[in-house]
Amino acid sequence: MGKKGERGPEFKYVTVVEELKSDPRVKCNKCGQVMVAGSGRIRLHFIGGHGCGVARCTAEDISVVKAEMIEIEEKVKERRQKGKEKRALEAMAGHEEAELRRQKRRQPGIVESFKKASQDELHRAVSRCFYANGLSFNLIRNKHFRAMCEKLKEVGSVGTLPSFDALRNQLLDKAYKESEDTQKDMLEQNKKKGCGVTLVSDGWKNVQKRPLINTLAVTPSGPLFLGSLDTSGKTKTAEFVKEVLAEKVELLEESGNQVVLVLTDSASNCRLARELLQAEYPKIIVGACLSHCLDLFLEDVAKLSWCRDAVQSAKDVVKLFLHHERPLALLREKTEKSLLFPVETRFASHYLMMKRLFELKNQIKQVVVSDEFDEFLKTAKKQERNKTAVASVLDQDFWEVLEMYTNLMGDTISFLRLVDGDTPTVGKVWAGMNNIAEKILKFGAPAHVDPLEIHHLFMKRWEMGHNPLHSIGFVLDPEYVECDQASNAEVMNDFFLVLDGWYESEESGHIEQELAKYQSREGVFGRPSTVANSKTMLAYKWWSLYGVGVPKLRDLAIKVLSQVSSVGAAERNWKDHSWLHSKLRNRLTPSRANKLVHVHGSICVEDKIWEAGYEETMVEWAPDEVIDDE
């Protein structure tokens, strides 16, 4: 029944006893008889063959097997008969006639010719649309673009494209209503899971220079855009920012979702707004964006005396290449990588510039000592600055500072990438930050670099970004159950402080008793697979699976460990804004741009959730390698 050399379905009813040159020696699983048989002889054994030297199966109740063998036998006979007829037909027609028939089959008919012409015209129209409007070639792979084309094919000539006004008004309003319904469904699912919500907010100016404040509800399934507010002509005081946040808190509370954490950037008005918000909603934890705090630490270190000059020299070297065509062309002959220039609105841009510069150290040195580069220097403007940049390239101390800075900040960058994503990471913060602090103290720096000074700067920013949820997450994250959090007074004080604020004393007592069971690894918590999965599963999912024996502690853990640590979702939302409300579409009103961003974000989150094989992972932050020629 299968390909040559493969054994058919008949062999599932026998056991191969011995492999022979031709057919194997098999034993019937029903009656126990041993025989030399292939697929055909096995079928006849169950059907009851005559004159073929195969004994009939003597087992009782083989009617189902017999029926299956008869069906297979009939198919084999039918296939053999068709083969005979085909061979007879080819023999009668002769080889020349058969070849002629094959050629005729390959020759397209009139209908096929028209279809090919229509297909060519369609391809021409689609390609011209792409080229005329500067559309990305990847759009042809987009499932929504293909779905649109399928619908056009279904409706045929009876369908018409929507008008300009319908697309920007009625259809947009309809899509906006659908995205709101989708968002409500996702919030309902989040409530059923017992996951809380992190409310994040950030400020920005759009292409029309309008100041905007956005708000997003971040859930484990993804960030949900709640809207952006045009604050033109308004003073962004702490009270004003607090009212914006309070309005969204009420909106989320009405949907049945508890706002566990509110995060903003580290600006002074936002800090005061968080304090005012917590005074009004005492059960909500407020805090600064940890990504911003880590980025400020990177900037603090870059301003130290031993690093400050190297940062400026690195900028001069990068400018020497990026602002002059000839040196850049010489560098591109030696590497495909590009130099990066620091951009104010991107995290860790100084680090990225210096790291890339150090990676291309050898290629840059080869360029500046070449004859072609010497010819360029003789005719280039700004001779003094160019000579200073070349001197830096040839100075070994400069490269040593770059290497030391990138090595020293490497752990900070790795952790920044982790916490800046949309994946829940609040349980990883305490351990991660203290690990960085310890490595700074142990870093083998030269005499003129004081690790204590760097450690002081780090702890200052850690204090700025710390909130009690980091301590609770550290206690409840199963990856750190062996860290003996009970002996850490600061961590446990934060834990009990929040516990007393969220629960009555009797319920707090139950949670504390269940916490003791968890920390001593009683019951399911001591299973090897449970311990192993604590290192690989998302923490809140781990509790959902294994916390059934401690229900109150499980609910608390799921609510806490499903929170994020930064306003990265709000930062990335501005990227959607700038893409949809660009210089080419600068006449969009803020309300229409707001609807477009809402619909776009809803579709993206929905696509991610319904994607085949979708699973939440620790998505890390990756920098955009965009060069700013400031």
Image: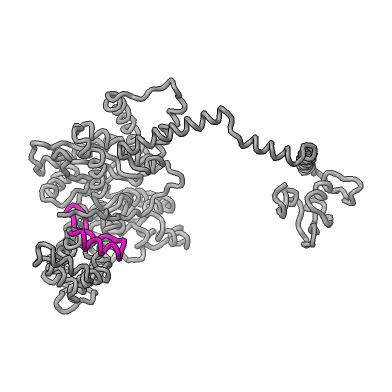
Measured along the vertical axis of the image, is residue 214 above or below residue 310?
above
Q: Image check: 292 left or right of 98?
A: left
Give coordinates of residue 445: x percent, y percent. 20, 76
Q: Residue furthest right?
A: 51
Q: Nearer the viewer, residue 174 or 352?
A: 352
| Residue at figure coordinates x 21%, y 61% from the top left | 326
User: Is most of the magenta stretch helix, strand or loop?
Assistant: loop
Can residue 550 be spotted in the picture? no
| Magenta extent | 324-349
* Snapshot colouring: one colour
Q: Residue furthest top?
A: 158
Q: Nearer the viewer, residue 311 or 488?
A: 311
Instruction: Specify the quadrant that holds the C terminus.
Output: bottom left
Give coordinates of residue 507: x percent, y percent. 31, 49
Q: Residue furthest bottom?
A: 447
| Residue at figure coordinates x 8%, y 36% from the top left | 233
Measured along the vertical axis of the image, is residue 7 above or below residue 201?
below
Q: Image check: 362 left or right of 268?
A: right
